[in-house]
Amino acid sequence: MQFKAVTLLAAFAGLAQAQTFTSTYVDPVNGLKYQSATENGITFGVALPATSNPTELVVQMRAPASVGWVGGSLGGSMKYSLLLVAWLNAQNQIVVSPRYATDYVMPTPLSGPVITVLKDSGIVNGELKVNVRCQGCTSWAGSEGTQSIATSGFQLLAYAANSFTKPSTPSSASSSLGIHSIFGILPALEMADAQNSDYTSKVNAQLPFAPPLPLLPSLSTPLSLAANSKLPALPPALALRPLPHRTVDLALLS
């Protein structure tokens, strides 16, 4: 289905009076600080590591649980931007698909970004909450060359959603999508206010799997044994200490 420009303009006209709320928001579950904006019941926010030139971020999207799909643009527009689209499959699991569009047509899956849905995502108080770690998402390559977001300073974001219709194949991240029923361009957000000095520890705590532990120095080199070599002998077992011997007068027990 084509995302016709005339349809977009008509939808935009209907949103002219929509109220937009921006905030610096600390998630009560994962503890990350986001710069976010809310409009038409859709919240789109970004959390960043407090490093220079970060290559990853966490995106949070919130929408009514009944939504067909919800998405956000990290470039502030539909065309030539990294788009993240999320929905629930038949098992109520969250599917997130990075997309890219060169025109007002259905965006196609984009290779490159590494997507991890964090553990604190799900249905919360009747709201779909999507927290996704997006690695390789502060810049992306497309038909217009390499684009990037501001990781400090102001950045435009945008959102879109289909309030009713799920993707045609909800189990697949490459499913076709119905056209959005609402969308909007959000006010420029100050990305410096989205930086988190403890980003890594907070994100690791929400990974659906434990991050790998670093190798101990003594185990950093793989063990190599020749065919006729022997393993080193184990240290002798500790000698068991006998319990003290006691004499019991059976007459006292009768």
Image (cartoon, helix red, strand yellow):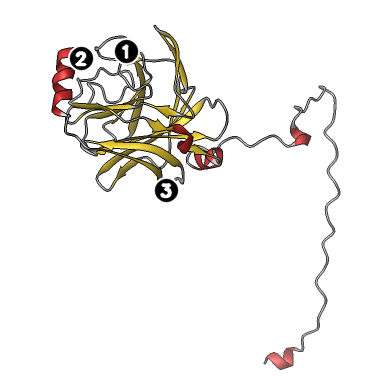
205 w.r.t. 49: above or below:
below
State left or right for residue 118 relative to residue 210: left
Q: Residue at x 20, y 23 (%)?
A: 180
Instruction: Please determine whether, in this image, residue 216 is positioned above or below residue 124.
Output: above
Question: The residue under label 3 is which amino acid type?
Answer: Val
Quarter of the figure with the C terminus: bottom right
Three-letter residue code for mark 2: Phe
Q: Amino acid at mark 1?
A: Ala
The residue wearing badge 3 is: 29
Residue assigned mark 1: 101
Element assignment for label 1: loop
**Relative height, residue 142 to residue 54 (above, below):** above
The label nearer to you, 3 versus 2, is 2
- Please rate how many residues cluster around mark 1, counting C-alpha atoms within 10 Å: few if below 14, some from 14 to 19, many from 20: many
What distance separates the C-alpha of mark 3 from that of mark 1? 33 Å
Spatial CA distance of label 1 from label 2 is 10 Å
Of pointers 1 and 2, the one earlier in the residue sequence: 2
Residues at marks 1 and 2 touching, judged by CB atoms closer than 8 Å? yes
Left or right: where 125 falls relative to 74: left
